[in-house]
Amino acid sequence: MEKLIIGEHIMKSFGEGEEQQIVLNRISIEIGEGEFISVMGPSGSGKSTLMHIISGLDRMDGGRVTFNNRSLVDMGENELSDMRRREMGFVFQQPTMLHNLNILDNIILPSMRDNRKEVANLVEKARYLMKKVGILELEKRSITEVSGGQLQRAGICRSLMNRPKIVFGDEPTGALNSKSAEEIMDIFSEINKEGTAVMMVTHDAKVAARTERVLFMRDGKVLDEIKLPKFDGKDIERRVEYVTEKMLEIGI
Amino acid sequence: MYKRIILNDFLRSKIISLTTIIFVAAAAMLVSLAAMLVVNLSGALDTLMKEAKTPHFMQMHSGDIDLERLEAFAEQNSNVDEYQVLEFLNIDGTQIVLGENSLANNVQDNGLSVQSEKFDFLLDLNGKVINVSDGELYVPVSYMRDNTTKIGDKAVIEGKEFTVVGFLRDSQMNSSLSGSKRFLVSKNDYDELKNHGNMEYLIEFRLKDVSQIGEFENAYASEGLEANGPAVTYQLFKLMNALSDGLLIAIILLVSALVVAIAFMCIRFALLTKIEGDYREIGVMKAIGLRISDIKKMYLAKYAMISALGCVVGFGLSLILKDMLLENIKLYMGESNNTLLALLLAIIGILCLFLTIIVFVNILLRRFREISAAEAIRFGSTQQKSLGARRVTLGRNRFMNTNIFLGMKDVLGRKRLYVTSLAVLVFSVFIIIVPQNLYNTISSDKFTQNMGVGNYDMRIDIQQTDNIHEKTSEIVEAITNDNSITRFTVLTTKTFQVSVKDGIEENMKVELGDHSIFPIEYSKGRAPITEEEIALSTIYADEWSKNVGDKIILTVEDVETELMVSGIYSDITNGGKTAKAVFQDSSSDVMWNIISAEFTNKTSVDKKISEYVNEFDFAKVSGIDEFVNQTFGSTILSVKKASYVAIAIALIITILVTLLFLKLLIVKDRYNISVMKAFGYTNKDITLQYTSRSVFVLIIGIILGTVLANTLGEQLAGMVISSFGASTFKFSVDVLPSYVFSPIMMICAVLIATIIGTMGIRRINITENMKE
């Protein structure tokens, strides 16, 4: 498997002087193409910050990250924007949508930046994705008129519009009930099956159990990791048990 | 604790706080200035008119005078306190040289007077009654103002040498609106020159009961006493003296009202944004049991400080600036005795402003009541329901750049938010265009036609001279033989008695002759053609409630003649009270003749005019430009200056408000901006979105502002112009400056403000702002 992201000795801290708090302490991480990986840890362990840095949403204080053989440190703001827009997808815990656009417009928003003239194709593609996740009838709704689960599906559609190499999910099921969470995870599994790498940040063992590799973090460090076979819809309880045991073992 | 909260808040939003302070300061300054000016003007005016003992009624008269009859009238009339007849020796402008400047081209009637003995004194610049010695000359203060002369200059009047030893305040004739100016000389010098000019009499009365002026005026008129000239009352003297500074005060009050409105809009927007930003905190404070009044206090304290600071700065500025604005009042009218009252009133004005702001903020803070603690903590922001502009969707946008589209869509979707800045832009466009159009209009030829002056090249006034008739014929003959003159006309002005209401008669100046040669614009009807017709100036028509088709009765050759009003026109000449007719009359004395002429070759007009000036030194020959320039050149100049000042003010306001608005908007939108950034929109993209919002709002502002300027603005300007005697008013627009350069200037101002205002976009950190 080719390496898509390589992070080495990533350092990140917030605050200054005595109040300085080290959030990421020389972390190294690798993500392969098409891989399905999750990062677990308690609040404040640094898992979201790690995701933000390897995706170029935030800058690191030290270390090195390459995406598709390009160093993020060497990239300017515009290059980072282009990279996020063209090669990455994002799904956050809270639906990050613009209030003044309807669902369809929110979904095509990132791709409109480059492909305005192909708007008809974009709309068609968005509808295809919306149908796939079961929200086609909501395209004209305002984002305040749909449920959290529906919004999250719309967020997934948006993340897939540009055929990204990787989709980052920052607690994508954190604000959902268990049924919606499961449905969302089914969609992520589907995306991964089609060849897109997925990186999840979660503190939910059920979510992590669906992935192929789980990293465990605490206090800005990766303490351990486990590998799991590709999820085929079976044995979820056993997988969850395995992840939970590991968590207890490490003490997170 | 409040101090710390306010200070922190202040430092966090420096530009927003500063801009608000600037607007409050500007509003406070203007309010304070207006208060000080009003008190000083009325104080100084009262002092001047008291010291000078201005007459309560004054009739100017030229021609024969029956002093005994007047004396008898004054004795009989129980209301007369004091009475006198002063002489005013009208000297032709060409015969007055002050220093190096001749008054040859001056449109004022300049003349000599001696100091009065009873009342109507001429005062020096210290407000004292002047005692003048032989060889000394006191010059009207307006000639000091326009630098015509200075103390120590040599003056030559009708060949006699004088030394300018000082300037005088004339409570009657100070104002440029008054057509005459009195120079003060000693009795001996006056007697020496007495035969060199035309004698006019000022028949003056001081009354016991000033409120009875109207009745006295009627009594004077009905006695058929000397009345060959205008009559002026105390109130009119007061009005003329107060008018120019009064206009300034009115403008300042108007601008201050607008600035106060802008300051309020700024405060409203800043406060609402702040509340939105602090939504969660407010909810938490409510949830932990703080009372709404406690929470309100924190916000109120900040605005109380901002307003207090603004008010203090504004007051300080007004103290610095007041002398500049009071200069004119002080020069023409002297010191006011009400300095303390002026300060007091200014402070009261500013306190009112301060309290209004506090009340306004208090009203805005009422919405705290609507904030649900639970909702605020859960969502952290107001749950907007409908956002409008639903049909404008990105999915249907095929032609427009996505960023520009998003900017415009946002404006349509959040209209209420943009109303503030739109209002400011509309206002800015309005105050740029209206003075500019007004200037264009009053400086155009069309306007002079509108104002009762026909479109000719040369005007020859023959008045205050003996044998007007012969002298006119002499000039007419020269003109008839002059090949360079294409057409001309002679208009003769005579006074006739007109019956206005039951038994009340008035003197009316009627211009007789052919009015079709250099036609003027009639606001209603047309020029008189038959002998039974007469056209009235707007002021006469209004005063007597006459309309086209109505009849008026004139005494012509001792016979009461009924004339029909054929038209009504605007007029600025002769105080706006004129009439035009074509009938023949040989009985009344000619007051003056005006010969208007047009030249074939427009390039040699100046040369021809100077030829006529040299040839006919008894007449006042002027080019039409010169005439217009002197009649209301200073008004044109003031409007021109005002239009430049308005442009500067409008641009500054535009830049400040746009800057403030964008800063606030970006703080408010930081979540949306970080979402955009996260999904790959660059800083440049987002800046373009905000720029297109600004430009879109600006374009709407320019359109609305232009429409308003041409409707409401035109009406407003018309109101100003009507004070000169105009009835109809239409803007004559110079397209390039009004509709090309002005919008370009506005666009540049908005772009500059947008570039500076959107710099903050770069600093918005995605991960910090996406945390809900």
Image: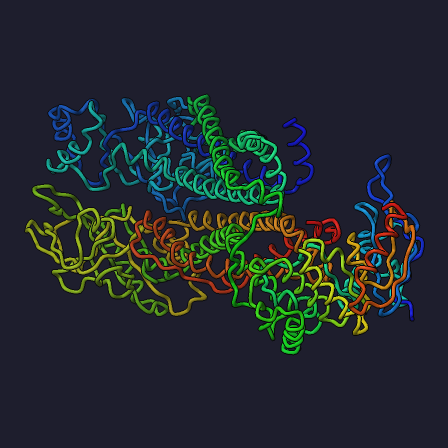
- Using the image, determine if residue A179 lies above or below residue B645: below
- Using the image, determine if residue B271 lies above or below residue B744: above
Q: Position of residue A234 (x, y in %)?
A: 79, 67
Q: Position of residue A189 (x, y in %)?
A: 77, 67
Q: Please state if B487 lies on the left or on the right of B338 as rendered.
A: left
Name, please, the residue furthest toward the left.
Answer: B559
Q: Please state if B527 lies on the left or on the right of B319 as rendered.
A: left
- Using the image, determine if residue B243 lies above or below residue B525: above
Q: How many numbered dots are placed on residues in this image?
A: 0
Q: How is the image coloured?
A: rainbow
- Using the image, determine if residue B331 lies above or below residue B629: above
Viewer-closest of B410 and B500: B410
Q: Position of residue B470 (x, y in %)?
A: 23, 54
Q: Please state if B575 lies on the left or on the right of B665 as rendered.
A: left
Based on the displayed image, in which of its 4 quarters is residue A31 positioned?
Answer: bottom right
Viewer-closest of B471 and B24: B24
Based on the displayed image, in which of its 4 quarters is residue B595 positioned?
Answer: bottom left
| Viewer can see residue B330 | no
Q: Position of residue B208 (x, y in %)?
A: 20, 22
Quadrant that contains the N terminus of chain B: top right
Viewer-closest of B629 and B450: B450
Viewer-closest of B449 and B509: B449
Q: Residue at point 22% right, 27% down? A: B210
Q: Please state if A86 lies on the left or on the right of A61 as rendered.
A: left
